[in-house]
Image (tube, rainbow, N blue to C red):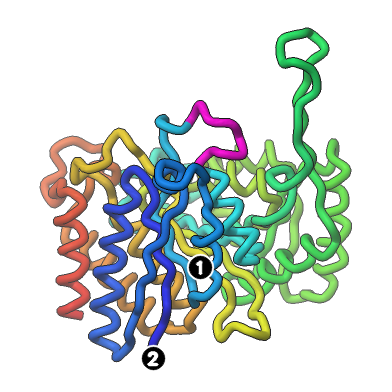
Amino acid sequence: MNYSIALTPGDGIGPEVSSKAVDVLDLIGDKFGHIFNFVELEAGGCAIDSTGEPLPASTLEAALQCDALLLGAVGGPKWETLPGNLRPERALLGLRAGLGVFANLRPAALLPQLKDACPLKDDVLTASHPEGKANFDLLIVRELTGGIYFGERGRDGDGRSPESSAFDTERYSRAEIERVLRVAYDAASKRRGKICLVDKANVLESSRFWREITMETAAEYKDIETSYMYVDNCAMQLIRAPGQFDVIVTSNIFGDILSDEASVLSGSIGMLASASIGAKSAVKKYPAGMYEPIHGSAPDIAGKDLANPLAAILSAAMMLRYSFSLEKEALAIESAVNKTLDSGLRTKDIASRAKNTANEKIVGTNEMAAAVIKALENG
């Protein structure tokens, strides 16, 4: 099979880690008889430098012609003084809206090999785990194309007088909420059958709307256990009892914050992949999909062979699973990553917090990726 993949390496460590994901996908193609054709595109800070805008129309147009999009990372201090509409991060919002990817799936699990890199004590982890184990495995389903990030915004006044103000608007339609809820309930049905809506329904009208629609939707999924939690409590519960969660579904801004918090519990944000998915259209063979590590561009370590490539590689695995239904191929990548971690190799961000750990070897981006490829070749 032939697959067309839009590749936006982006800024900072983005090109480094995305190139390793491409190497892994090329090997998967050789092993399983697929051809992955990559169309490299500019988005983010690099696009600002060359075109003056974070998301050139040509990039979105080309991405829409591809079967899926693999993103490195965007942003950095170089562009932080630009107006909001010209910041690199606007490329992410434009790609999400343009591709129609409305549900972001961010898994956060504590791999046994990385338990010593988790900041939580074993007794904290076991207290909330349904089987009393010192780990957790949760999925955050974040609404991606609505809410405050896409709502009306602006400023009144000159910015200097006491009367000057700025505003961002949180607005959700029933359709936007319903479609992401169904993604979350379908995910829960393939996991442990539990879903938690995270909102701020005691204060926000938009959250009350989310809760009302969730109650209606829950009635259609009687085999799924549905619960509700305020976002401030959820932020606390992720620290004190992460094992209680299976699937968390929430709004754009809450999901953005909570998924970054959960990533730290997994040992490092450098381990977390994500999938942004949409509905299958009448004109495209595959459902819309955008895949990216959640770690950001980390410009301070760019070009130093320090970045952890595993989140980008695991994002490629999610692309194979969710966009192309290539489950064997996705499992092969995940197995290779696990074997690499079993061997004791660690980038600095996932090294054990314990000193003098004999079975660990700190390696750089290139050696870590090479080890994954070797495990994949031998698998």
Tell me the tag on residue 269: none
Residue 210, relative to residue 163: is it above or below? below
- Image x and y of residue 356, in percent: 13, 38
Residue 278, relative to residue 272: is it above or below? below
Indicate the secondary structure of the residue bearing disc 1: helix
- The kind of residue tagged 1 is Ala
Q: Residues within 10 Å of mark 2 (few under 14, many from 20)?
A: few
Of all residues shown, which one is farthest toward the front?
51
Please give the range of residues in magenta.
80-88
Question: Which residue is labeled 2 in the image?
Answer: 1
Determine the image quadrant of residue 192: bottom right
- Image x and y of residue 229, in percent: 73, 47
- Residue 260 located within the stretch drawn in magenta: no
Q: Nearer the viewer, residue 14 or 253?
A: 14
Residue 87, relative to residue 282: is it above or below? above
- The kind of residue tagged 2 is Met
Question: Which residue is labeled 1 in the image?
Answer: 63
Q: Considering the image in quadrants, where does the C terminus appear?
A: bottom left
